[in-house]
Amino acid sequence: MNNWDNPIDEIKSEITALKSSLKDAHNKINTLEQENKNLKNQLTKLQTDILNNHKVTIAIKEQNSRVEIKQDQILEQLNSLFQQLGGNEQDYEPNMDDMSDNASQSNYEYSDDTHITRIVYIDGDIIFHEENLDLPPIGGITQDDPNTSTNLSILQRTAHTFGFGNI
C-alpha cells in the first residue's frame, strides 16, 4: 500500500499547488482588469479635458479676433476724426503705431463728459495708470464759445489729449 499512497499524495500536492497558482492567476487578472478600468477612466477624462481645452482655445481665438476687429474699427474712427480735425498724415502715423501697440492692453473709464482714467498693461503688468485725466477743450475752445456751433465730443478731446495731430 505504500506504493499507492505515495503517488496519490504527490498528485494531491500538485493539485493543491495548481489550485494556489490558479487562485494567484485569478487575482492577477482581477488586478489587471481594475488597472485597465482605471486607465480607461483616465483616458476618458483626458479626452474630455482636451475637448474642453480645445473649446477654450477656440473661444479665446474668437475673442481675440473680435478685439482685433474692434481695434481696427477704433483706429479707423480715429483716422477719420484726425482727418476731420485737419491733421496731416505725417503727424498721425507715429501716434497710430503707438496706439495700435497699446490698444488691446489699455482700459479707459469715462465718468462724465470730460473725465477719463487710463490704465495700460503689458504682459499683465500696469505700466501706465493715470487718474483724473481731465480733457481740455481742443485749441482753447470752451463749451461756451459762441463761435462754435457744436461742442467737441469726448472722442475728439481724447484724440487731441493723446497727441493725434496738431489742432
Image (cartoon, grey):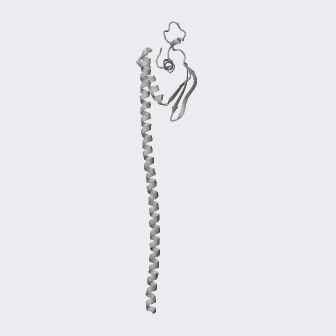
Question: Which quadrant of the rendered structure holds the N terminus?
Answer: bottom left
- The extreme top residue here reads 146
Query: Is residue 138 depicted above or below 121 in this figure?
Result: above
Residue at x 44%, y 62% (from the top left corner) = 33
Q: Position of residue 71 (x, y in %)?
A: 44, 27
Q: Position of residue 80 (x, y in %)?
A: 42, 19
Residue at x 46%, y 72% (from the top left corner) = 23
Query: Is residue 146 depicted above or below 3 in this figure?
Result: above
**Tag count:** 0
- In this rendering, position of residue 114 left or right of residue 84: right
Query: Is residue 10 depicted above or below 26 in this figure?
Result: below
- In this rendering, position of residue 28 left or right of residue 111: left
Query: Is residue 86 depicted above or below 23 in this figure?
Result: above
- The extreme bottom residue here reads 1
**Could you say which quadrant of the image residue 19 lies in?**
bottom left
Q: Position of residue 161 (x, y in %)?
A: 51, 19
Q: Nearer the viewer, residue 109 or 100?
A: 109
Residue at x 45%, y 54% (from the top left corner) = 41
**Could you say which quadrant of the image residue 65 lies in?**
top left
Residue at x 43%, y 56% (from the top left corner) = 40
Q: Position of residue 117 (x, y in %)?
A: 55, 25
